[in-house]
Image: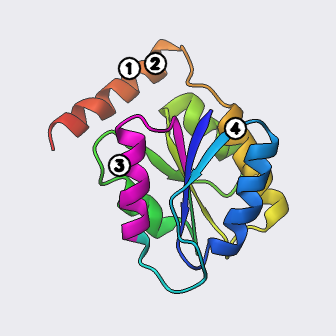
Amino acid sequence: MHIIVGSDHAGFPLKATLIAHMEASGHTVTDIGSFDAEPVDFPDITRSLTSRIANGEGQRGLLVCGTGVGASIAANKVKGIRAAVCHDVHSAHQSVEHDDVNVMCIGAQIVGPWLAKDLVSSFLAAEFSTDEDFRRRVSKLAEMDAQR
């Protein structure tokens, strides 16, 4: 799977660990920044990542910032993006299985490297359910997107 990854300065140190983990698991990773620990505004990184996901350059995205919350708010403003903050393994896979989430946001100040790797593995292994209830609900989310 092709994954687009981005971080702000708070997520920068953890991002390198996660990129190595994803590549070791056989995924193709495109890192869109930040590329150092200098302060950067998370909406700028989020805009760059979500535009790539929305136009099909990657199947899923991973945003790493301080808490994951700001990145999630920003990502969900982009048509076609369904982002979730995931700090537990259950949410990481169920957000994809039930809600067809395509961008996971995690907080480097909330989770450590060990848990973050488990979150990423769970998120990337998950597939959107074929259950009609979940498909119907996500279709309604697409309708909401179309009304923007």
Relative depth, front residue between 89 and 39: 39
Q: Residue 51 carries which label?
A: 3
| Residue picked out by circle 1 | 136
Distance CA(mark 1)–CA(mark 3): 25 Å
Q: Which residue in the rendered view is the most extreme toward the bottom?
A: 38
Disc marking residue 133: 2
Quarter that holds the N terminus? top right
Q: Is residue 89 visible?
A: no
SS at mark 1 in the image? helix
Question: Which quadrant of the view contains residue 37?
Answer: bottom right
Quarter-of-image position of residue 79: top left
Answer with mark 4 or mark 2, whichever residue precedes in sequence: 4
The residue closer to the viewer here, 51 or 69, is: 51
Q: Marks 3 and 2, how far apart in space?
A: 28 Å
How crowded pointer 2 is (Cα within 10 Å; few <14, some 14-19, many 20+) is rated as: few
Q: Which amino acid does label 4 sit on?
A: His
Q: Report the amino acid beneath label 2.
A: Asp
Which amino acid type corresponds to the residue marked 1 in the rendered image?
Arg
- Residue 113: image x %, image y %? 80, 64
Looking at the image, tell me whether mark 3 or mark 2 is earlier in sequence order: 3
Label located before the other in sequence (3 or 4): 4
Q: Position of residue 120 (x, y in %)?
A: 70, 48
Residue 50 lies in the magenta stretch: yes
Q: Position of residue 138 (x, y in %)?
A: 39, 28
Q: Residue at x 46, y 80 (%)?
A: 40
Query: What's the magenta region?
Result: 43-62
